[in-house]
Image (cartoon, grey):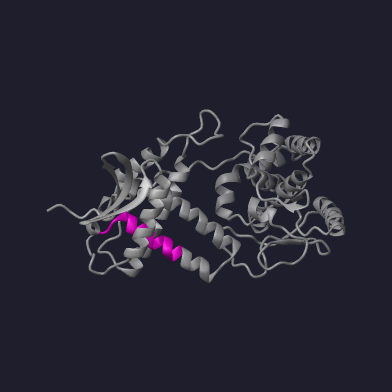
Amino acid sequence: MQRDKGPRLWIEKRKGREPVYVIRDGKTKRSTGIPAGRDEEARQELARYIAENYGPEPYKAQAAQISVAEVLAYYARTLQKAAERKDTPAVRRGTATRMIHIANLLTFWETRTLADVRTSVCEKYEEHRKAQPRRRGMRKGAESVGSGTVRLELKTLGRAITAWHGESPLPALPVIWKPDAPKARERYLERHEAARLIRAARRLKFPHLVRYILLGVYTGTRDDAMRRLRWMRASQDGWIDTQRGILYRAGFAEDQTSKRRPPMVLPDRLLGHVRRWAARDQAAGLTHAITYRGQPVGDLHKSWASMVKAAGLGRDVTPHTLKHTAITWMLWAGRSIWEVSEDTGTSPKTIEEVYGHHRTVESRLDRAGRRRA
């Protein structure tokens, strides 16, 4: 007996007329009216159809009876409901990212069922994603999709199956194979490289990047939290208390996530800069610490790339390099892993595994009687 494949897209060819996408669901066939070639619109229409007509149903006890598409559609609805209950910037960003994952997963999984979720098929998904055309603007030699992205998307598939299982228990949860986690980036800036970046930012008249670099290398604050910093106490954004010299990475009403954002006492060599910036901005009526032409900075990609090129550094220098630099410099200064963890919001385990060799080298230099860099 042929199993029901669940709702899926099909291109219907019509004599004398343009082919269109139809949704086939068992004996039901519904035209979308979307011409062949407009894949993204067709996938969105399929997602709407599934969301309207399907949900966890207890009578579907076998994995072969449950399509991955309806599982992903159910998970999308739970994400949207959660975002409505708790509408914060962090929740909105997380929801948007997982919605992108769901759209990408559907390109491969929409005709498959939970019975297909096994190692060999997950490996084929990785091949499928890596074979997709390179996006515009990507550098030569770069993969269109890396293993790290595939890993995150398959994690989202696992979360979707778990959400379904919570509403309609499955006899057994499929095991999701994922590619190995990419090797941790260890690129950090030497002090002369950081100086070159700052000089390049000034030459290009990017004062917002000068602030961004200095805050990054001395505090290790993550990109998003840094761009949202304000000069006054806020509920959903971090802020800087210039009087007491404290950096609050999270707003007072924000919940802590796995990406910890603890407060930090600003080092003296940075505090002087910060107080001058605050006085200048408050006189001009600016609320955010990092602005460009009077507006908060939303995206650094173009200006960052221009600055790195002007500084003569490689593409491996990214905004996240500043966090690596901050942690490395703190360890060079002889601070303990626990102190660095508290200041940067990075777990002691990660610091030990990714940056521990810096501390080892510094201790050897101390024993040799050489001064730290």
Please name whichever residue, 103 or 147, is drawn nearer the observer in this view of the structure: 103
When the figure is inspected, residue 255 is found, relative to residue 299, above or below; the finding is: below
Which residue is at a point 51% across and 41% down the rendered structure image? 183
Please name whichever residue, 243 or 144, is drawn nearer the observer in this view of the structure: 144
Q: Is residue 67 magenta?
A: yes
330 relative position to 162: left or right: right
Which residue is at a point 57% across and 41% down the rendered structure image? 185
Please name whichever residue, 43 or 238, is drawn nearer the observer in this view of the structure: 43
The secondary structure that most of the magenta stretch takes on is helix
User: Picture coordinates of residue 180 (x, y %)?
Assistant: 42, 43
Query: In this figure, what is the number of numbered marks?
Result: 0
Which residue is at a point 33% across and 50% down the rendered structure image? 110
Residue 225 figure quarter? bottom right
Q: Is residue 108 magenta?
A: no
Could you tell me if residue 54 is visible in this image?
Answer: no
Which residue is at a point 34% across and 60% down the rendered structure image? 50
Residue 235 figure quarter? bottom right
179 relative position to 89: left or right: left
Of all residues, the one furthest to the left in this rendering is 1
Query: Which quarter of the rendered picture does the C terminus lie within?
Result: top right
163 relative position to 372: left or right: left
Could you tell me if residue 133 is visible in this image?
Answer: yes
Please name whichever residue, 142 or 95, is drawn nearer the observer in this view of the structure: 95
User: Picture coordinates of residue 171 (x, y %)?
Assistant: 25, 64
What's drawn in magenta, residue-wise? 66-79
User: Picture coordinates of residue 25 (x, y %)?
Assistant: 25, 56
